[in-house]
Image: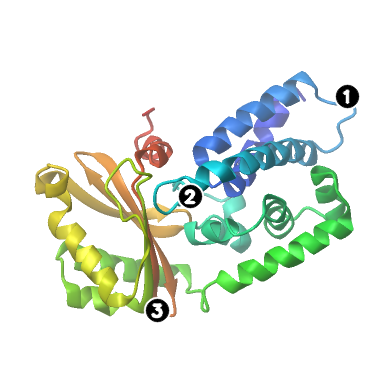
Amino acid sequence: MAEIELFEAQRRRLFGVAYRMLGSASDAEDVLQDAWLRFSAARPVDLRSPDAYLTTIVTRLCLDRLKSARASREEYIGPWLPEPLVTDAAPGPERSAALAESVTLAFMVLLETLSPEERAVFLLREVFEHDYDEIATMLETTPANCRQLLHRAKGRVAEGRPRFRDAAQEKRPLVDRFVRALVAANADELRGVLAEDIGFWSDGGGKVLAARRPVFGLEAVVRVLVGIRRTGPATVGVPLETVSIDVIDINAEPAMVLRIAGRVDSVYTFTIDGGAIAAIRVVRNPDKLRFLERQLTGSPT
């Protein structure tokens, strides 16, 4: 099989690894381009496992990027959130429960608490089901060390996971209720869908208006949401009739997409825990919405 056919057969899986490692669809695309150049220039003659070989290239490229990204993320203005993307509902890798959970924004935020090596081992073992020997080769370490890294990673992830994981079909009605309450700027209705200890994060990257710090607590978050609804369009100088809101599947969960004059302005993702919205994460940084815009419109941005 030609190099390009081998690579394309693995592209979707490789993108999944890179996106979960980096939290950026744009960076994941760049990594795949670099991986293809390396693979096409130096493909082993007796390649037995294209999956493992290509995953090794992608993982090492991602580790290099993660290590260099830490400094820039420390200087990031306001909360840093992963890039949202539309997940494919068609049969394929995202159908497994582990894959679906691992692509949610809430879970990817949890992955940010891990070291690059812990993140790699956790994803390769728990999500993509590589064995310890393969992972050790990819990371140039030992299987025993991989087991230790996984143990530490699983402990940190378990601490941050929701207490109850609501079924996917139970999330959409709650998100629909939230959208109706937000559109109406109805504080009482918002209180009916939000948890008492809710957290709110907004990522503008210093490029658009967004809260510079997380907001916690029911009443504080309700005030923020009502304020956004009542003053948001006026703040950016656009008429209200140019604003539209849709609920679509983003990162394997129902999310609210707000458009202004036809372009994506904000993406609201939700953590639902025990029948209430426990966390809202809003991505507004326009750099992080370009890939999503391209997915939704089918054209370059």
Label 2: state its secondary structure: loop
Q: Is residue 99 above or below residue 23?
A: below
| Residue that carries the numbered disc 3 in the rendered image | 275
N-terminal-most mark, 1 or 3: 1
- Residue 82's tag is 2
| Quadrant that contains the N terminus | top right
Label 1: state its secondary structure: loop
User: Residue 176 or 124: which is nearer the viewer?
Assistant: 124
Q: Is residue 87 above or below residue 51?
A: below
| Residue that carries the numbered disc 1 in the rendered image | 45
Residue at horizontal 42%, vertical 54%? 79
9 lies left or right of 224: right
Q: Give amino acid for label 3.
A: Gly
Q: Residues within 10 Å of mark 1 (few under 14, many from 20)?
A: few
Q: What is the CA distance from the residue labelled 1 to the residue labelled 2?
A: 38 Å
Q: Are marks 1 and 3 in contact (CB under 8 Å)?
A: no
288 lies left or right of 118: left
Residue at horizontal 51%, vertical 46%? 73
N-terminal-most mark, 1 or 2: 1
Label 3: state its secondary structure: loop
Q: Give amino acid for label 1.
A: Val
Which of the two marks, 3 or 2, is nearer to us in this view?
2
Residue at horizontal 62%, vertical 67%? 157
Q: Is residue 1 above or below residue 218?
A: above
Q: Are marks 1 and 2 in contact (CB under 8 Å)?
A: no
